[in-house]
Image (spheres, grey):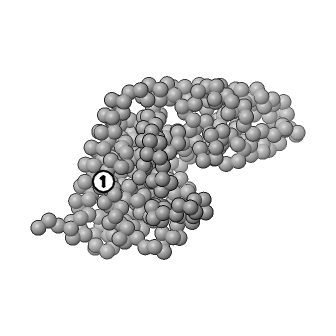
């Protein structure tokens, strides 16, 4: 059984892109692996969130991932800040992380451009905190997207460096969890790139959206003037909508509208109405569970407490052994 660790952003609501890109695979992973899923609230501090918003967002993320199928009886789901051991390992790893390698990190260089008014030390050492999150449980596998591959490589570097400095084989070098063909990338509704809140609320369909909101978003989705030749290649904005339809609709529905497009008979209004209704039907069971869990504070508290206890049991063992290896020993 592999030990798998994955972070969950503590900002923003769960949308179709998150669900098909990660959550469906998390649900599969928890059947055959020892999974740790943490809500990364420490990481959000690099943008100085409002304290009330921070707590609200953490609760919302917990609710939505539970509603989507993360099972606290099969996996360990916890809040990152509930593990002080993570902060300690982050401190210890920082002693062997070098300024030059951190400054060369692609994400750091991008952040300098987008938030140049707030270039804090947390941004610079973000990969070290990520490494601490992973190797605190001595993980073997990490599900990562393309944008996180460099961070995972740095995690392997920090684990390997620790082992070399202290002449041990204590930390495994975690590898990327390969989803193969199961990884579905859901594009946004704006006709450009991936679905995500950072691209604007109108670009993403959230699992908690009301049906009327979904209809309005889908009907405003970017389209063109329609095909001019039989079987012509679909432009990116149209292909994006068909990609979403393939994820949420029946094969017959996709085949029907694909045929209309290829015969230059498609009416985008009808196409988008069908897509909206299929998205509503797909998200309805999850939204129902979101609404139910949101009002069950006792259950959420129980899940968070149990997750913290299970995660700390693993993390505490690691910290005790790391301190011993590094020479921190009681008299």
Foreground residue among 205 and 236? 205
Q: Residues within 10 Å of mark 1 (few under 14, many from 20)?
A: few
- Is 183 left or right of 310, judged from the image as shown? right
Quadrant of the image containing the C terminus: bottom left
In the rendering, at what x and y percent does residue 146 appear?
56, 56
In the rendering, at what x and y percent does residue 310 appear?
28, 44
Q: Is residue 110 visible?
A: no
- Is 105 left or right of 74, judged from the image as shown? right
Numbered disc total: 1
Give the quadrant of residue 110. Answer: bottom right
Query: Height in image: 105 above or below 135?
Result: below
The residue under the point 83% across, 42% down is 232
Instruction: Determine whether the residue tagged by mark 1 lies in a helix, strand or loop.
Output: helix
The residue under the point 38% across, 27% down is 296
Per the image, the residue denoted by label 1 is: 84
Give the quadrant of residue 321. Answer: bottom left
Give the quadrant of residue 137. Answer: bottom left
- Is 20 left or right of 303, judged from the image as shown? right
In the rendering, at what x and y percent does residue 251 appear?
65, 30
In the rendering, at what x and y percent does residue 209 appear?
58, 30
The residue under the point 47% across, 46% down is 50
Query: Height in image: 255 above or below 120?
Result: above
Q: Is residue 229 visible?
A: yes
Q: State the residue lying farthest toward the right.
A: 228
The residue under the point 47% across, 26% down is 291
Foreground residue among 45 and 178? 45
């Amino acid at each position: 059984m592999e030990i798998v660790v994955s972070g969950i952003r503590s900002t923003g609501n769960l949308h179709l892109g998150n669900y098909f890109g990660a959550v469906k695979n998390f649900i599969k992973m928890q059947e055959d692996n020892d999974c740790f899923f943490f809500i990364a609230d420490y990481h959000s501090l690099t943008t100085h969130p409002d304290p009330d918003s921070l707590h609200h967002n953490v609760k919302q993320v917990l609710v939505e991932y539970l509603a989507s199928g993360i099972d606290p009886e099969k996996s360990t789901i916890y809040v990152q800040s509930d593990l002080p051991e993570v902060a300690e390992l982050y401190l210890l790893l920082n002693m062997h992380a070098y300024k030059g390698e951190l400054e060369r990190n692609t994400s750091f260089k991008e952040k300098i451009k987008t938030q140049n008014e707030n270039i804090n030390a947390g941004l610079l050492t973000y990969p070290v905190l990520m490494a601490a999150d992973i190797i605190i449980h001595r993980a073997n596998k990490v599900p990562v997207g393309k944008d996180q591959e460099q961070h995972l490589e740095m995690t392997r570097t920090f684990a390997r460096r620790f082992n070399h400095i202290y002449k041990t084989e204590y930390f495994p070098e975690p590898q990327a969890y390969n989803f193969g063909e199961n990884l579905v990338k859901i594009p946004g509704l704006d006709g450009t790139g991936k679905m995500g809140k950072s691209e604007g609320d109108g670009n993403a369909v959230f699992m908690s959206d009301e049906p009327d909101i979904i209809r309005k978003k889908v009907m405003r989705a970017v389209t063109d003037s329609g095909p001019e030749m039989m079987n012509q290649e679909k432009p990116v904005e149209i292909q994006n909508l068909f990609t979403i339809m393939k994820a949420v609709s029946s094969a017959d529905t996709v085949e029907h509208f694909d045929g209309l497009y290829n015969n230059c008979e498609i009416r985008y209004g009808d196409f988008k109405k069908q897509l909206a209704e299929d998205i509503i039907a797909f998200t309805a069971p999850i939204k129902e569970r979101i609404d139910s869990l949101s009002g069950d504070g006792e259950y959420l508290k129980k899940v968070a407490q149990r997750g913290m206890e299970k995660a700390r049991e693993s993390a505490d063992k690691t910290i005790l052994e790391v301190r011993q290896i590094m020479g921190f020993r009681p008299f």
